[in-house]
Amino acid sequence: MLTAVLGELIPADPATEAHMRVRQSFNALALADQAIAAKVRLLYDDFHRQMADLVRRDQQAGHIPAALDAREVAAGLVALAEGLAFYVLIDVTPAATARERLSAAIADLYASAGPSSLDVGEEPRAQG
């Protein structure tokens, strides 16, 4: 689930590229305008909370080490995905490479829980 959600931040086609250009432009404006920055902080707080909920779910299932702070893990993965997206947008990194790097970071997170029934790089399937 983390790969699917965070992978949406990496431009994959003209529509997602346009979306991410607007998102990154809005974030850049927040550097100079405190009213925009306040709104961006609220949006990130909500997004980080949602991602942390996904991390906690997988911690409870034993797929991610329980000792890790779910909120910090989520914020770090979001920052990685958005940083890679920025690199894609300015042609520093190809989109495929960005997706591979994001997927590798997520796979490392799951692998850090130790041996499990998961194949390398495979996230657990959602239950329910």
Image: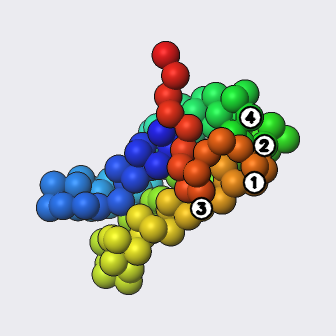
**Amino acid, disc 3:** Ala
**SS type, badge 3:** helix
Give percent across and percent down for residue 116.
Answer: 71, 44
**Amino acid on which the number 4 mark rests in the picture:** Gly
Residue found at x 56% / y 56% = 121
Q: Which residue was labeled with disc 2?
A: 65
Instruction: Tell me the distance, in whole angstroms, between the alpha carbons under discs 2 and 1.
Output: 7 Å
Residue named by callout 4? 62
Looking at the image, residue 14 sits to the left or right of residue 52; the answer is left
User: Is residue 70 found left or right of 90 in the rendered image?
Assistant: right
Q: Which amino acid does label 2 sit on?
A: Pro
**Mark 1 vs mark 3, CA separation in Å:** 11 Å
Q: At x 78% / y 50%, what residue is drawn?
A: 114
Could you tell me if residue 47 is visible in this image?
no
- 31, 65: nearer the viewer: 65
Going from N to C along the chain, the mark reached first, 4 or 1, is 4
Distance of label 4 from label 2 (alpha carbons): 7 Å
**Residue 14 shows in the view:** yes
In the rendered structure, are the residues bearing label 2 and label 1 in contact, judged by CB atoms less than 8 Å apart? Answer: yes
Q: What residue type is labelled 1?
A: Ser
Q: In this view, does 92 lie above or below 88?
A: below
In the rendering, which numbered label is found on residue 105? 3
SS for dot 4:
loop
At horizontal 61% and vertical 45% (from top left) the residue drawn is 118
